[in-house]
Image (cartoon, helix red, strand yellow):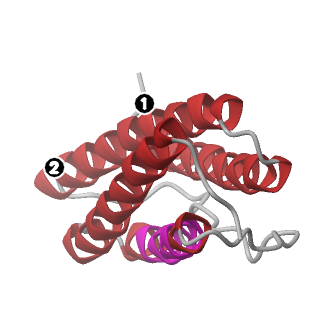
């Protein structure tokens, strides 16, 4: 059973809060997206974020889970979408907001990785950060394919 410094506890609390927000946003964005492929991408990312939240909750209780090689990686649609103007603007906003969120969360993991003393916790955080970066890549791919990223 691990014990954490007050700084580590604070970082875990912040990461848990961020992951809760990620889950909520991706579920909302899945419901709000106009394109079916984007809905599916948001839904798949929400599931990965829920896994991050579960892992962080487990870590905060003092147990370091074994991190697997990763599950199925969410994939962005690679064909341009034929959009109505309002729908395009909606999906573009959702993707840009989600990409900003991913950049922030990845940065929070980066800082945390350097602050934890336990190697198992650092490895788990590093694994989750890599997945956050992959989410950003998927969002960028969708934006780029649809000429929404300038």
Is residue 116 something one can see in this rendering? Answer: yes
Q: Which residues are magenta?
A: 42-56
The numbered dot on residue 85 is: 2
Magenta span includes 54: yes
Whole-percent x, y for residue 80 in the image = 49, 54
Magenta span includes 49: yes
Comparing 28 with 70, the one in front is 70
Mark 1 and mark 2: Cα distance apart in space: 16 Å
User: Which residue sits at x=47%, y=41%?
Assistant: 6
Whole-percent x, y for residue 50 in the image = 48, 75
Q: Which residue lies under the disc numbered 1?
A: 149
First in sequence: mark 1 or mark 2?
Answer: 2
Which residue in the rendered view is the most extreme toward the top? Answer: 150
State left or right for residue 22 relative to residue 71.
left
Is residue 147 something one can see in this rendering? Answer: no
The numbered dot on residue 77 is: none
């Amino acid at each position: 059973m691990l014990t954490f410094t007050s700084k580590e506890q604070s970082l875990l609390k912040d990461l848990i809060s961020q992951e809760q927000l990620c889950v909520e946003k991706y579920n909302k964005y899945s419901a709000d997206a106009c394109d079916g492929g984007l809905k599916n991408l948001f839904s798949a990312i929400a599931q990965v974020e829920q896994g991050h939240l579960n892992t962080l909750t487990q870590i905060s209780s003092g147990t370091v889970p074994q991190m697997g090689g990763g599950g199925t990686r969410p994939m962005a649609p690679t064909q341009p979408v034929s959009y109505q103007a309002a729908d395009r603007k909606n999906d573009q906003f959702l993707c840009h907001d989600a990409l900003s969120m991913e950049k922030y969360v990845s940065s929070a993991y980066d800082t945390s990785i350097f602050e934890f003393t336990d190697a198992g916790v650092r490895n788990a955080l590093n694994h989750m950060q890599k997945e956050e970066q992959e989410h950003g890549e998927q969002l960028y791919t969708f934006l780029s394919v649809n000429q929404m990223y300038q």
